[in-house]
């Protein structure tokens, strides 16, 4: 952020002009309850700048907000922008010409879409750029030598670049490559810098950007505030949004644990100014190093979810160190910046952070401190079925919509419970808002009023209370796949257009959670559902993903195993014999040594395969979209899946296979910094070599065999995973931080030796994608104590033969595994073959479900030698 540099020069009275840039794309509308037009009065402003003559000023921010001043910044008025997405930067090209940029992310797929606007009449009217395939655009810079404007953006697989240029005053954009190398995304501004601006200006708000005219400074802030300061000893004055400040400050562990229905309830229903802090923008339990680009994207997506619910801001807690003093200092900064009346703390926060914010808030005179959890109990609760009368939606709708952005595979909880841990009056007064009984200034309330949902809207919402029952009837009451398909179509047809995507994704998650052994039709239901989604949402990246996923599960080698298992289960049900003794023989472990600690995670003999014809494949019914979505067609997941289809030799290959073969090579060999090339390049940093061995390991969690030593020498001792193989087994060795394993309880206490419920356990999860389509994978999970679970894309009917041993040594835990090769692929492994493989730790309570679009940083490309 330029604000760091501005603060430095501010203290000595020097400031340079604000510079920036722009672009545009075709964007989805926000949720129907997000009243963007009304929210522009209070929208947080991200950038501000003035024309060369200092007469006109522009400020841009959330909800497509563009503010214009034509009297040297004295008065500001809202100008129609034609978009509702967040705007991130603005730059003047002359006294009449300017460019604005911004963007947003698609739900489910999280694909970034950029927007660029231009004006040639001093900011009165704005026009979209003709370039509609831009990624999310972040910042602008004028280049004087050729009068170009350069935009820094998320990495684009279409252009293989983070940079885009306009040479025609913002009307069109192109990428000429990163001539000076990939630009670094600016880090989030430190809280100490934010606090310095609060102390300098006297305004209890976050300053996001500053600009300068000949004699005056201007600051763009949260809550739609604009400040003005004169040269010399700075006397700052609020010229827009006087005395506005935060009412409720929410502190959460991650975006997925933010109490989203509470945000909507307080901001939209009660008009409270709500600000959010997150400890980690992404889950820390991965085997990948923090990546600034990825963290910036996760944070931008979380900010979009917050803005949709009328929150003022979402920022990251980033202390200078992890010791108690650093965290307390960070808490002091944020409490002093916001001066909230209520602080709300996430129950899942680490103890140091939670205690620091609680103690600092009480010491600073915050009247009320509240803790929340997603379980029953507490002083107040918000049920997912609660009706939001202003929003015209259920609390669960707000929750689900936010999760579809920040964590698509997670499901909403039935209840959000709140417990008052401190109240300055001794006993909190209960009411509709957490601020009930606390004196609140008018500036802590949103200035804009929201139109309440009308009677018809509320009737529709009330009728939707029966949705869970209808979903259950759809899944449990459909005797055949055809009946399921017909009922699904009818259910979606009778749902309002704006609610269909949300409902369909909820149904998808529930269908995928079915136990295939008790519901063998679940696989056919999944295919039928994906076909409906691909057709119904053909113009959305969600529908395109559904089409790609459908093709993958119809063709993948991993799902071939499930199809045979489904056939066997159906045959067993028809003969009323669910158990075939021949298929329940216990395999004898070749690694079993007395008192060795090896866990055999198998109860089935791998040599006995049921000869069953697979279920018939559904054919893709996707309608062709009238416009080609290049952001999707060139997305790495599309290119990788197309290459996998080509290598499999599918009869009906994916549409992009032939056309994208060259594009796949282009992605693999790209010189532009991006995580996908790191994974795909032959000499990429995420390449792992697997060598054959003639002697199996002892399987004791110690890499002391010769072939492990060779692997360590080849791949490097810091590689998170090592792999070797022989004719019968594939061997894996994974070393994890000891601190990632502290909670090892399992939900079930049965004596079975496989497929334990590990949701409440810290565990290692290994995913093996043998056909490299990034859409399907074998999954192995294990705890330090040896509890295991195996599945194919969450389907536990897969029963492979595998063995695992764990060894705790100092600060590390090492896992050594042997997986029967025939349970991963039918034919022997050959030299030059390659897989994708992921190994990561999951904390107790973390979902093991895979995201729709895989994170390449969590995967490695394995080549067999």
Image (cartoon, rainbow, N blue to C red):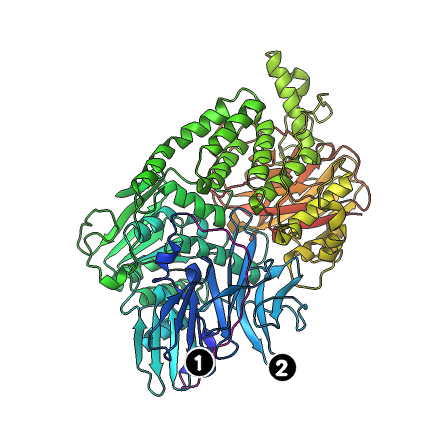
The answer to whether residue 833 is left or right of residue 837 is right
Q: Earlier in the sequence, mark 2 or mark 1?
A: 1
- In contact (CB < 8 Å): disc 2 and disc 1: no
Which region shows up in magenta? 11-31
Whether residue 454 is in magenta: the answer is: no
Whether residue 12 is in magenta: the answer is: yes
Q: Is residue 253 visible?
A: no
Q: Is residue 821 above or below residue 181?
A: above
Task: Return the x and y of residue 462 as percentages of the image width and height.
Answer: 33, 35
Task: Return the x and y of residue 148 as percentages of the image width and height.
Answer: 60, 75
Of 746 and 579, nearer the camera is 579
The answer to whether residue 190 is left or right of residue 681 is left
Q: Is residue 310 visible?
A: yes
Of 307 and 459, nearer the camera is 459
Mark 2 highlights which residue? 145
Marks 2 and 1 sit apart, C-alpha to C-alpha, by: 28 Å
The answer to whether residue 311 is left or right of residue 541 is left
Crowding around mark 2 (Cα neighbors within 10 Å: few <14, some 14 to 19, many 20+) is few
Q: Is residue 345 above or below residue 700?
A: below
Task: Return the x and y of residue 81 as percentages of the image width and height.
Answer: 45, 63
Of 17 and 125, nearer the camera is 125
The residue at the far bottom in this view is 232
Of 633 and 608, nearer the camera is 633
Label 1 SS: helix
Mark 1 highlights which residue? 8
Q: Taken as a whole, is the magenta stretch helix, strand or loop?
A: loop
């Amino acid at each position: 952020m330029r604000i760091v540099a501005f603060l430095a020069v501010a203290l000595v009275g020097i400031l340079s002009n604000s510079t920036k840039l722009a672009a545009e794309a075709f964007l989805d509308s926000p949720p129907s309850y997000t009243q963007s037009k009304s929210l522009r009065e209070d929208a947080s402003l991200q950038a501000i700048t003035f024309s060369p003559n200092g007469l006109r000023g522009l400020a841009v921010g959330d909800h497509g907000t563009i503010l214009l001043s034509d009297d040297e910044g004295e008065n500001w008025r809202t100008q129609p922008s034609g978009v509702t997405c967040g705007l991130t930067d603005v730059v003047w090209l002359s006294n009449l010409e300017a460019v604005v940029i911004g963007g947003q992310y698609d739900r489910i797929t999280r694909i970034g879409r950029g927007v660029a606007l231009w004006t040639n009449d001093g900011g009165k009217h704005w026009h979209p750029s003709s370039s509609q395939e831009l990624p999310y655009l972040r910042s602008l810079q004028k280049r004087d030598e050729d009068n170009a404007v350069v935009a820094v953006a998320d990495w684009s697989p279409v252009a293989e670049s983070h940079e885009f240029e306009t040479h025609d005053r913002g009307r069109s954009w192109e990428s000429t490559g990163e001539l000076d190398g990939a630009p670094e995304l600016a880090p989030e501004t430190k809280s100490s810098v934010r606090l310095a601006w609060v102390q300098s200006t006297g305004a209890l708000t976050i300053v996001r950007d500053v600009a300068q005219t000949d004699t005056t400074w201007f600051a763009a802030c949260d809550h739609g505030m604009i400040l003005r300061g004169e040269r010399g000893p700075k006397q700052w004055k609020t010229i827009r949004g006087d005395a506005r400040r935060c009412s409720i400050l929410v502190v959460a562990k991650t975006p997925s644990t933010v109490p989203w229905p509470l945000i909507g309830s307080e901001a939209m229903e009660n008009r409270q100014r709500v600000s959010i802090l997150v400890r980690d923008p992404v889950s820390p339990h991965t085997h990948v190093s923090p990546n600034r680009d990825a963290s910036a994207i996760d944070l931008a997506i979380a900010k979009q979810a917050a803005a949709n619910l009328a929150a003022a801001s979402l920022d990251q807690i980033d202390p200078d160190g992890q010791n108690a003093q650093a965290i307390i200092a960070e808490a002091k900064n944020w409490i002093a910046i916001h001066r909230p009346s209520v602080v709300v703390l996430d129950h899942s926060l680490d103890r140091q952070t939670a205690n620091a914010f609680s103690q600092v808030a009480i010491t600073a005179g915050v009247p009320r401190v509240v803790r929340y959890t997603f379980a029953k109990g507490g002083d107040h609760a918000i049920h997912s079925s609660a009706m939001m009368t202003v929003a015209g939606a259920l609390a669960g709708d707000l929750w689900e919509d936010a999760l579809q952005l920040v964590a698509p595979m997670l499901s909403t909880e039935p209840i959000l419970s709140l417990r008052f841990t401190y109240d300055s009056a001794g006993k909190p007064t209960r009411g509709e808002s957490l601020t009930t009984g606390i004196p609140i200034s008018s500036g802590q309330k949103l200035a804009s009023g929201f139109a309440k949902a009308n009677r018809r809207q509320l009737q529709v919402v009330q009728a939707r209370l029966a949705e869970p029952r209808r979903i259950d009837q759809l899944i449990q009451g459909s005797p055949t796949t055809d009946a399921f398909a017909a009922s699904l179509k009818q259910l979606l047809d009778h749902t309002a257009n704006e609610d269909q995507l949300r409902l369909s994704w909820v149904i998808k998650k529930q269908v995928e959670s079915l136990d295939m052994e008790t519901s063998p039709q679940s696989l056919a239901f999944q295919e039928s559902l994906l076909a409906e989604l691909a057709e119904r949402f053909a113009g959305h990246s969600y529908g395109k993903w559904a089409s790609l996923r459908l093709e993958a599960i119809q063709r993948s080698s991993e799902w071939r195993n499930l199809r045979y298992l489904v056939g066997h289960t159906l045959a067993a049900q028809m003969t009323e014999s669910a158990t075939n003794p021949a298929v329940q023989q216990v395999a004898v472990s070749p690694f079993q040594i007395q008192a060795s600690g090896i866990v055999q995670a198998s109860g089935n003999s791998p040599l006995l395969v049921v000869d069953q014809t697979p279920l018939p494949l559904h054919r893709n019914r996707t309608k062709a979209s009238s416009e080609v979505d290049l952001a999707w067609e060139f997305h790495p997941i599309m290119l990788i899946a197309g290459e996998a289809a080509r290598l499999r030799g599918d009869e009906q290959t994916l549409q992009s296979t032939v056309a994208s073969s060259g594009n796949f090579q282009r992605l693999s060999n790209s010189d532009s910094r991006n995580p996908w090339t790191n994974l795909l390049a032959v000499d990429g940093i995420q390449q792992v070599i697997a060598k054959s061995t003639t002697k199996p390991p002892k399987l004791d969690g110690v890499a002391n065999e010769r072939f492990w030593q060779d692997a360590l020498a080849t791949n490097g001792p810091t590689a998170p995973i090592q792999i070797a193989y022989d004719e019968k087994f594939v061997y894996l060795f994974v070393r994890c931080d000891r601190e990632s394993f502290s909670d090892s309880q399992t939900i079930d206490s049965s004596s079975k030796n496989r497929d334990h419920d590990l949701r409440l356990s810290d565990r290692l999860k290994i995913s093996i994608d043998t056909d490299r389509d990034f859409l399907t994978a074998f999954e192995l999970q294990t705890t330090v104590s040896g509890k295991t679970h195996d599945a194919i894309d969450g389907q536990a009917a897969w029963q492979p033969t595998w063995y695992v041993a764990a060894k705790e040594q100092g600060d590390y835990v090492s896992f050594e595994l042997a997986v029967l090769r025939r349970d991963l692929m039918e034919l022997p492994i050959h030299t030059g073959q390659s897989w994708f493989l992921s190994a990561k730790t999951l904390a107790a309570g973390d979902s093991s479900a895979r995201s729709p679009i895989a994170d390449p940083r969590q995967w490695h490309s394995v080549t067999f030698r």
